[in-house]
Image (cartoon, rainbow, N blue to C red):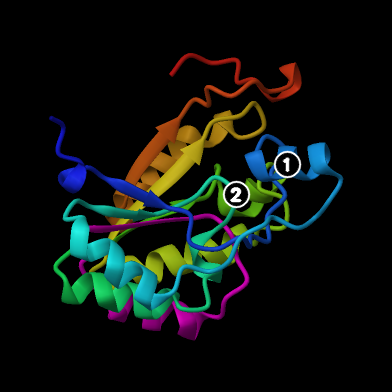
Amino acid sequence: MINFKYKTLNIEGTPRCTLECSMCKRTTYFDLHKTKVIPGRDLTPDDLKKILKFFEGPIVFGGQLSDPIFNKHFIELLEICREHNTRTFVLTAATGRKEGWYENAFLANPNAEWTFGIDGLPYISHTYRKNQNGEFLFKMMLLARSMGIKTVWQYIIFRYNEKYVRVCKQLAIKYGITLNLILSQREMPDDMQPIGKY
Protein backbone atom coordinates (compact mmCIF):
# COMPACT_ATOMS: atom_id res chain seq x y z
CA MET A 1 0.00 0.00 0.00
CA ILE A 2 1.30 3.47 -0.91
CA ASN A 3 1.39 6.00 1.92
CA PHE A 4 0.36 9.32 0.41
CA LYS A 5 0.77 11.06 3.77
CA TYR A 6 4.39 11.93 2.95
CA LYS A 7 4.06 12.93 -0.70
CA THR A 8 4.42 16.52 -1.89
CA LEU A 9 1.11 18.36 -2.27
CA ASN A 10 0.80 21.17 -4.84
CA ILE A 11 -2.03 23.48 -3.86
CA GLU A 12 -3.91 25.67 -6.32
CA GLY A 13 -4.89 28.14 -3.61
CA THR A 14 -6.90 30.73 -5.54
CA PRO A 15 -8.52 31.17 -8.95
CA ARG A 16 -6.81 34.53 -9.56
CA CYS A 17 -3.71 35.64 -11.47
CA THR A 18 -2.84 38.90 -13.23
CA LEU A 19 -0.62 37.28 -15.88
CA GLU A 20 -1.67 36.28 -19.39
CA CYS A 21 1.21 34.02 -20.42
CA SER A 22 0.54 32.71 -23.92
CA MET A 23 1.28 29.03 -23.17
CA CYS A 24 -0.30 28.94 -19.70
CA LYS A 25 -3.20 26.58 -19.03
CA ARG A 26 -5.09 29.62 -17.74
CA THR A 27 -4.88 31.32 -21.14
CA THR A 28 -5.85 28.07 -22.86
CA TYR A 29 -8.87 27.80 -20.55
CA PHE A 30 -9.93 31.38 -21.39
CA ASP A 31 -9.66 30.69 -25.11
CA LEU A 32 -11.52 27.39 -24.89
CA HIS A 33 -14.37 28.59 -22.67
CA LYS A 34 -14.60 32.18 -23.97
CA THR A 35 -14.38 33.58 -20.44
CA LYS A 36 -11.95 35.50 -18.25
CA VAL A 37 -13.10 33.77 -15.07
CA ILE A 38 -11.58 30.62 -13.58
CA PRO A 39 -14.03 28.76 -11.32
CA GLY A 40 -13.07 28.13 -7.71
CA ARG A 41 -12.41 29.93 -4.45
CA ASP A 42 -9.54 30.78 -2.14
CA LEU A 43 -8.17 28.05 0.10
CA THR A 44 -9.07 29.08 3.66
CA PRO A 45 -7.04 28.67 6.85
CA ASP A 46 -9.56 26.04 8.03
CA ASP A 47 -9.11 24.14 4.75
CA LEU A 48 -5.36 24.06 5.24
CA LYS A 49 -5.63 22.97 8.87
CA LYS A 50 -7.80 20.03 7.76
CA ILE A 51 -5.24 19.07 5.12
CA LEU A 52 -2.39 19.19 7.64
CA LYS A 53 -4.23 16.79 9.97
CA PHE A 54 -3.81 14.06 7.36
CA PHE A 55 -0.81 15.13 5.31
CA GLU A 56 2.76 15.50 6.56
CA GLY A 57 4.68 16.02 3.33
CA PRO A 58 5.87 19.31 1.84
CA ILE A 59 3.29 21.83 0.66
CA VAL A 60 3.82 23.70 -2.60
CA PHE A 61 1.76 26.83 -3.15
CA GLY A 62 2.01 26.98 -6.91
CA GLY A 63 -0.61 26.35 -9.48
CA GLN A 64 -1.30 25.94 -13.13
CA LEU A 65 -4.17 28.43 -13.29
CA SER A 66 -3.36 30.97 -10.59
CA ASP A 67 -0.65 32.65 -8.53
CA PRO A 68 -0.63 31.99 -4.77
CA ILE A 69 0.03 35.62 -3.79
CA PHE A 70 -3.58 36.46 -4.65
CA ASN A 71 -5.10 34.16 -2.04
CA LYS A 72 -6.61 36.63 0.44
CA HIS A 73 -5.49 34.42 3.35
CA PHE A 74 -2.02 33.69 2.03
CA ILE A 75 0.02 35.22 4.85
CA GLU A 76 -2.06 33.30 7.38
CA LEU A 77 -1.57 30.10 5.35
CA LEU A 78 2.19 30.63 5.54
CA GLU A 79 1.95 31.11 9.31
CA ILE A 80 -0.05 27.89 9.68
CA CYS A 81 2.60 25.96 7.73
CA ARG A 82 5.29 27.44 9.97
CA GLU A 83 3.35 26.47 13.12
CA HIS A 84 3.02 22.88 11.82
CA ASN A 85 6.72 22.69 10.81
CA THR A 86 5.57 21.93 7.27
CA ARG A 87 8.16 22.27 4.50
CA THR A 88 6.74 25.06 2.38
CA PHE A 89 7.45 26.17 -1.17
CA VAL A 90 5.98 29.22 -2.92
CA LEU A 91 6.06 29.51 -6.72
CA THR A 92 5.17 32.98 -7.97
CA ALA A 93 5.52 35.03 -11.13
CA ALA A 94 2.69 37.54 -10.90
CA THR A 95 2.88 41.05 -9.54
CA GLY A 96 0.11 43.06 -7.96
CA ARG A 97 1.04 43.17 -4.27
CA LYS A 98 2.95 45.98 -2.56
CA GLU A 99 6.43 45.63 -1.08
CA GLY A 100 5.07 45.68 2.48
CA TRP A 101 2.88 42.67 1.69
CA TYR A 102 5.92 40.69 0.53
CA GLU A 103 7.87 41.62 3.65
CA ASN A 104 4.99 40.39 5.83
CA ALA A 105 4.75 37.18 3.80
CA PHE A 106 8.48 36.48 4.21
CA LEU A 107 8.24 37.13 7.96
CA ALA A 108 5.18 34.88 8.26
CA ASN A 109 7.25 31.82 7.40
CA PRO A 110 11.01 32.46 7.18
CA ASN A 111 11.59 28.76 6.41
CA ALA A 112 9.52 28.81 3.22
CA GLU A 113 11.42 28.62 -0.06
CA TRP A 114 10.29 31.13 -2.69
CA THR A 115 10.70 30.63 -6.44
CA PHE A 116 10.31 33.74 -8.58
CA GLY A 117 9.47 33.27 -12.28
CA ILE A 118 11.47 35.96 -14.07
CA ASP A 119 12.45 34.96 -17.60
CA GLY A 120 15.74 36.61 -18.44
CA LEU A 121 16.67 40.11 -17.39
CA PRO A 122 13.84 41.65 -15.36
CA TYR A 123 13.02 44.39 -17.86
CA ILE A 124 12.18 41.86 -20.63
CA SER A 125 10.50 39.12 -18.57
CA HIS A 126 7.04 40.48 -19.44
CA THR A 127 7.62 39.48 -23.08
CA TYR A 128 6.22 36.04 -22.19
CA ARG A 129 4.79 36.75 -18.74
CA LYS A 130 2.34 39.37 -19.95
CA ASN A 131 1.35 41.97 -17.33
CA GLN A 132 4.32 41.12 -15.11
CA ASN A 133 6.45 43.90 -13.65
CA GLY A 134 9.69 41.94 -13.81
CA GLU A 135 11.81 44.70 -12.31
CA PHE A 136 9.55 44.95 -9.25
CA LEU A 137 9.48 41.16 -8.85
CA PHE A 138 13.28 41.02 -9.09
CA LYS A 139 13.42 43.62 -6.33
CA MET A 140 11.10 41.44 -4.18
CA MET A 141 13.35 38.45 -4.86
CA LEU A 142 16.33 40.46 -3.61
CA LEU A 143 14.29 41.55 -0.57
CA ALA A 144 13.55 37.91 0.21
CA ARG A 145 17.23 37.03 -0.10
CA SER A 146 18.24 39.95 2.14
CA MET A 147 15.81 38.64 4.80
CA GLY A 148 17.44 35.20 4.75
CA ILE A 149 14.70 33.51 2.72
CA LYS A 150 15.82 30.60 0.52
CA THR A 151 15.31 32.03 -2.94
CA VAL A 152 15.20 30.50 -6.43
CA TRP A 153 15.14 32.42 -9.71
CA GLN A 154 13.20 30.41 -12.32
CA TYR A 155 14.18 31.41 -15.86
CA ILE A 156 12.38 29.80 -18.80
CA ILE A 157 14.65 30.06 -21.84
CA PHE A 158 13.02 31.49 -24.96
CA ARG A 159 14.59 32.85 -28.12
CA TYR A 160 14.13 36.44 -26.96
CA ASN A 161 15.98 35.91 -23.68
CA GLU A 162 18.54 33.19 -24.37
CA LYS A 163 21.33 35.68 -25.00
CA TYR A 164 21.04 36.85 -21.38
CA VAL A 165 21.68 33.48 -19.72
CA ARG A 166 25.33 34.26 -18.96
CA VAL A 167 24.64 37.68 -17.43
CA CYS A 168 21.77 36.26 -15.37
CA LYS A 169 24.06 33.53 -14.05
CA GLN A 170 26.45 36.26 -12.94
CA LEU A 171 23.60 38.19 -11.26
CA ALA A 172 22.47 35.06 -9.43
CA ILE A 173 25.99 34.47 -8.12
CA LYS A 174 26.32 38.12 -7.12
CA TYR A 175 23.14 38.02 -5.03
CA GLY A 176 23.46 34.45 -3.72
CA ILE A 177 20.33 33.22 -5.50
CA THR A 178 19.86 29.78 -7.02
CA LEU A 179 19.19 30.09 -10.76
CA ASN A 180 16.93 27.41 -12.24
CA LEU A 181 17.15 27.45 -16.05
CA ILE A 182 14.22 25.71 -17.76
CA LEU A 183 13.74 24.55 -21.33
CA SER A 184 9.98 24.37 -21.59
CA GLN A 185 8.45 21.06 -22.67
CA ARG A 186 5.28 22.81 -23.81
CA GLU A 187 4.73 23.42 -27.48
CA MET A 188 5.67 26.93 -28.45
CA PRO A 189 5.69 28.90 -31.68
CA ASP A 190 8.86 28.51 -33.73
CA ASP A 191 9.82 32.14 -33.18
CA MET A 192 9.92 31.55 -29.41
CA GLN A 193 11.99 28.33 -29.53
CA PRO A 194 15.54 28.91 -28.26
CA ILE A 195 18.25 28.25 -30.83
CA GLY A 196 21.17 27.49 -28.50
CA LYS A 197 21.93 24.26 -26.66
CA TYR A 198 21.74 24.34 -22.86
Q: Position of residue 6 (x, y in %)?
A: 16, 46
Q: Amino acid at mark 2?
A: Leu
Residue at coordinates 80% horizontally, 37% vertically from top-left? Answer: 32
Residue at coordinates 26% horizontally, 66% vertically from top-left? Answer: 149
151 versus 101 height, above or below: above
**Magenta part of the chain:** 87-111
Residue at coordinates 54% horizontally, 16% vertically from top-left? Answer: 196
Whether residue 127 is visible, yes or no, is yes
Tags 1 and 2 touching, CB below 8 Å = yes
Q: In which quadrant is the C terminus drawn?
A: top left
Image side of residue 107 versus residue 123, left or right? left
Q: Earlier in the sequence, mark 1 or mark 2?
A: 1
Q: Amino acid at mark 1?
A: Tyr
Residue 29's tag is 1
Secondary structure of residue under mark 1: helix
Q: Position of residue 21 (x, y in %)?
A: 69, 44
Q: Nearer the viewer, residue 140 or 93?
A: 93
Q: In which quadrant is the N terminus drawn?
A: top left
Mark 1, other Cα within 10 Å: few <14 / some 14–19 / many ≥20? some
The residue that mark 2 highlights is 65
Is residue 140 in the magenta section? no
Q: Nearer the viewer, residue 68 or 127?
A: 68
Image side of residue 62 versus residue 17, left or right? left
**Whole-number angstrom distance, CA of label 1 to CA of label 2:** 9 Å
